[in-house]
Amino acid sequence: MNEGQHAAVAPPSPAPEPAPSKQVPVISAAKPPVITGERAAAPKPDDTAFAPALGSAEWHQQASGAVLTSAAAVSAPVAQAAAAPLPPGGPGPHEDDTPTEVVRKPRGWRPRKQRSVPRLDIGRHLATEADLELLQLTGTSFGFPLGRNQAGFPVTLTLFQPVPVSIALVGASWAARLLAYRALRFGAKVHVFTDRPAGWADLGRAATDREDRVAVLEPGALTSVAATADAPILSLYDAESPPPPAKPAPWQARAMVLHRFTPHRSEAALSADVLLLQRLAPDEAAAIAAARRLTAQTAEQLRAMHDDMLAVLTKSENHYVWVTPEEREQDELGAPGRY
């Protein structure tokens, strides 16, 4: 190297791309209004942010500090303070009373009458079943529907993602079938691993009028169907034995049904990304409250939920949801309940 020359510096290596992160928030369309002036006191660092459950007078007296209750309380004055809409006819005159400019039309101007346009008729188009299959849509852009919160707004869940999501349902067959039914209506395929196959095979035709959307398999069976963003898969395990360990697959959610919350199944249930709870027995509520560090008041609420309610617990949020089954869902699944 001659004097005055500098050694060549290698260009910096590109930064590695970050791995996709898993986000499992419960998304509610109900957003608390923005309040100007005095700020409300922050909630205590416990589970008082759990949304109100019962919707009764007793619950409103006992849970005045809940987030949704306080948001509903402040929404009324905000709605009253909103500006009333303008009357028909548009805004009034300008403040400076500037005269309106008159546009003069040229002499001989008159409106021209247009002929009626004939009706456009392009005929009918026929498509094969394979072509129609390409038009299948999913709801990945707006979330998996769970139900409605106390304010009546939809509550959805980001269930199918590039990073797989795990669910634990402490409940019975009715809630498990509702989860599968809505996954089918969402556009997903459902694989049911169960030792109680009765009633599962007909669920696909009831939800989608097709027989290729539900596969009923024995516990521990292997599948070779790959999930995609356009065709996600819900793998539902409804058996006494826990599901075997499986390699996580993108766009696939794994749901484990626990008909009873027992100590030997608690680790698998509490490690799930999403924990769905129907109304709990006293021992179940006490065990889950101790494991999740919930208050005694919340444990009591978990024992008093209605038949059409679910408690939704994630790593960062807790919600109560009314599943509000549609008429078609009730005709197929029956009345809500833990059975």
Image (cartoon, helix red, strand yellow):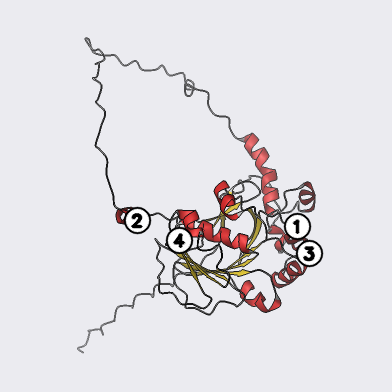
Which residue type does callout 4 highlight?
Ala
Q: Earlier in the sequence, mark 4 or mark 3?
A: 4
Q: Position of residue 109 (x, y in %)?
A: 23, 12
Q: Earlier in the sequence, mark 4 or mark 1?
A: 4
**Furthest-front residue in this view:** 198
Q: What is the crowding at mark 4: few (fewer than 14 residues within 10 Å), some, or many (at least 20)? A: many
Front disc: 4 or 3: 4
Q: Report if the CB atoms under discs 4 and 1 are less than 8 Å apart.
A: no
Q: Position of residue 241 (x, y in %)?
A: 60, 78
Dot 2 corresponds to which residue? 133
Q: Report if the CB atoms under discs 3 and 2 are less than 8 Å apart.
A: no
Which of these two is toward me, 251 or 240? 240
Query: In which quadrant is the C terminus drawn?
Result: bottom right
Front disc: 3 or 2: 2
Residue at 70 percent of width and 77 percent of height: 263
Q: Report if the CB atoms under discs 4 and 3 are less than 8 Å apart.
A: no
Q: Is residue 308 above or below residue 287?
A: above
Which of these two is toward me, 61 or 1? 61
What separation in Å lies between label 1 and label 3 (alpha carbons)? 13 Å
Which residue type does callout 1 highlight?
Ala
Q: Give the structural element (helix, strand or loop) at label 1.
A: loop
Q: Give the structural element (helix, strand or loop) at label 4.
A: loop
Query: In which quadrant is the N terminus drawn?
Result: bottom left
Dot 4 corresponds to which residue? 188
Kindly tell me whether residue 28 is visible in this rendering: no
